[in-house]
Image: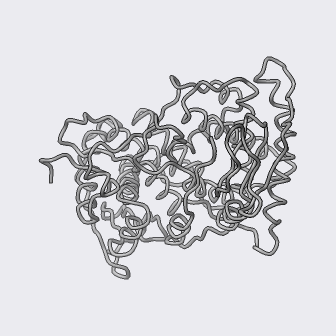
Amino acid sequence: MRVRPGRGRNLLVATTVALVALTACSGRTGSPPGVAASSAPAPADTVNRALDDLERFWTATYPTISDGKPFPPIQGGFHPYTQADPPPPCGSEAGVYQPNAFYCPDGDFIAWDAEKLIPELQTNFGQLLVALVMAHEYGHAIQHRLGVTNQPTVVLEQQADCFAGAWLADALAGRSTAAGGITPAQIDSALAGMLQLRDQPGTSATSAGAHGNAFDRIRALQDGVQNGATTCAGYRADNLPITEVPFTQERDAASGGNLPYDEAVDVLVKDAAEYWSRAYPQLTGQPWKELTVQPFAPGSAPECASPDAIADGAAFYCPEGDFIAFDNEQLGPTLYDRAGDNAVGMLVGDLYARAAQHRRGQSTQGDGQLTVDCLNGSWTYDLLHRDARSQQTQLSPGDLDEAVAALLAFGRATAGTGPSGFDRIAAYRNGVLKGLSACG
């Protein structure tokens, strides 16, 4: 988040520690949901089952995107590697150990770090993320067979994410031999892992080796789930809504694009209020009334008979008093410290959107929660489309990923209650990309 002067082919891998800590701040951990550690298959078994199932899937699906041509199986094999036994060479490049996974077009093989990467991903985020990593690399093999190689790296990487999503849709339909009975909580855990497989904030989408920010990569995965492999096969540089941008100011790069916490809260609350003073009349034909914001310390929340709460009650809209309140000593600072200033923005935006839903007599539960998320995204749309030369608050690189992290911190699926984080991110993205008119 920034305020203008004048106003008060491989898999990119990063550490998994931050996201595990962030999800823990809302009472959840990064352990594979619903699967006891002792009952989970070994990571090598997870990989092997996924690869077998991916061959099944692409044998059936490839002809639908290749004018009926049959799928040519991978010829160079599958290669787990370790520091003591590095991967095979790929073309002129020597095989060197890296905590990574990759597809080699010259040798037509897939290789992965079986020593650190895959075991850590399974431990922290579950078997489904490991399967999706393999599905992503298989996606590169599909590109090679289709002859789609002359696109920017970020397009090729997101196309591979989309192909992985097409496989996930097949698994969700019950046809997978490797991933049966997938739960919303398992999907949300895999999405949390994808946050760690993103470019670092400030990476340009035009950089060599760019894979995309988490917002774009999850969008591509969801595109595959919702629209299938044919849509993925059509990915090109001129038809993808890429949101990844570099830092343009040294001070933003130095701060990671984050305002100090107290300033961020003040700026975000004022900006949300200003946005809704414009958006609510468009949505309802009625004027927006000023909304009171009450920060509180743990154990001293303002009284409210029937709070519409999120984050395990640490933030809420109070219909009776027509105010919003949030824990400004633990919840807000924890989101800020572990994800960034726009994670706090997501909290503020959710509460304002929740108030808007109540004021216009609409539900915030079930599908109503998805409308809240879309409305929250419409504020982000407004932030994204402001003149860079204006004095208004604007987004910084990484802010969209912080929004996704926040949704997965206080909006992940729990047993039988409310929409999943997967669905909530999709609803938020709809608002981000299309604006207020998309939210109804």
Front residue of 19 and 329: 19
Q: Is residue 419 visible?
A: no
Furthest toward the left, the residue is 6
Compared with residue 330, is residue 226 higher up or lower down, i.e. above or below?
above
Left or right: 259 with respect to 111?
left
> What residue appears at the point 20 percent right and 35 percent down from the top-left corner?
389
Residue 109 position by quadrant = top right
Furthest toward the bottom, the residue is 299
Left or right: 169 with respect to 204?
right
Front residue of 314 and 402: 402
| Residue 301, image x, y percentages | 34, 76
Compared with residue 210, is residue 100 higher up or lower down, i.e. above or below?
below
Quarter of the image with the C terminus in it: top left
> What residue appears at the point 82 percent right and 24 percent down from the top-left corner?
63
Residue 384 position by quadrant = top left
| Residue 72, image x, y percentages | 86, 29
Residue 16 position by quadrant = bottom right
Q: Is residue 182 visible?
A: yes
> What residue appears at the point 84 percent right and 60 percent down from the top-left corner?
45
